[in-house]
Image (spheres, rainbow, N blue to C red):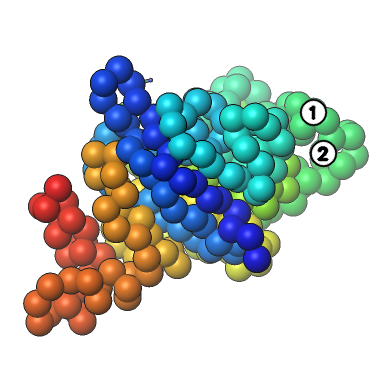
Amino acid sequence: MAPVIETEGLTKRYGRQAAVDQLTFEVQEGEIFGFLGPNGAGKTTTLLMLLGLTEPSAGRARVLGFDPVREPLKVKRQVGYLPENVGFYEDLTARENLTYVSRLNGLSEAEGQERIDQALKIVGLAEEGVKLVGAYSRGMRQRLGIAELLIKEPRLVFLDEPTLGLDPDGINRMLDLIVSLSRERGISILLSSHLLHQVQRICDRVGIMIKGHLVARGTIEELRQLMPGEGKAGASLEDIYMRYFQEA
Ligand SMILES: Nc1ncnc2c1ncn2[C@@H]1O[C@H](COP(=O)(O)OP(=O)(O)OP(=O)(O)O)[C@@H](O)[C@H]1O
Ligand SMILES: [Mg+2]
């Protein structure tokens, strides 16, 4: 099966600095792939290039078989994106916000309402759909962001720090939701995060990005095997991450 994401030498330079440097990796269909890295590592820049929202300086990418530079609309139609800061119309209800999105996606009124019902149910906001988004908590907003991207029934979603700012219960609900999108709906997922415990819990494979370079990628078990020394069998993702971080 063809990967849902493939890149080769993907690079983005801002002036003389490379925010993403020669990135080569792939994400397989059905996988939850976690992108890890400190602030400024190039995670968001990578997502933006894959979506066709910013142009690479070099290299190439394929997303669901499309070139995001030449076919950005085809990519956007099938890929759901939860940005770092999700924006909504605060003085509209959640339903009204989603109705707006479904119209933008060219859905008929009936189909739009059906998908909105389903999306709100999936994210656990069925009862709260009639509330103004201005009155939503951070956790509800993040889940509404997921509902929004589900409206277009994507095959692939990009989640940029989906648990940022959530309390422990909110984090767990979001992680369970992400896993259910993968397992129950077969959606492939690329997510970025700083939270290693969470990533360890839900991701099939991870990539560690530091200063624009992908310094490691694989399953956590594969990365463990690459660790030096005796204690590697019990190494956590945090141990693995710190090793690459210190070497960089
Ligand atoms: N529009 C821009 N103009 C200039 N430099 C930029 C721009 N966008 C990002 N950069 C730089 O590119 C580098 C990578 O940024 P990016 O936002 O991709 O990192 P990140 O891994 O998402 O970080 P964070 O964890 O803080 O979200 C940083 O050095 C950043 O300052
Ligand atoms: Mg970022």
Local secondary structure at mark 1: helix
Please say if 55 is above or below 230: above
Q: What residue type is labelled 2?
A: Gly
The front one of 52 and 196 is 52
Mark 2–mark 1 contact, CB under 8 Å?
yes
Residue density around tag 2, few if under 14, some if 14–19, many if 20 or more, within 10 Å: many
Q: Can residue 127 be seen in this view?
A: no
Local secondary structure at mark 2: helix
Ligand 2 neighbours mark 2 (CB distance < 8 Å): no
Quarter assignment of residue 75 = top right
The front one of 193 and 71 is 71
Quarter assignment of residue 92 = top right
Q: Residue at x 42, y 59 (%)?
A: 172
| Residue beneath disc 1 | 103
Please say if 11 is above or below 206: above
Residue density around tag 1, few if under 14, some if 14–19, many if 20 or more, within 10 Å: few
Relative placement, left or right, of 41 versus 245 is right
Ligand 2 neighbours mark 1 (CB distance < 8 Å): no
Relative placement, left or right, of 225 versus 46 is left
Question: Which mark identifies residue 112?
Answer: 2
Q: Can residue 30 be seen in this view?
A: yes
Please say if 148 is above or below 205: above
Question: Which mark identifies residue 3?
Answer: none
Q: Residue at x 65, y 29 (%)?
A: 70
Q: Residue at x 12, y 73 (%)?
A: 228
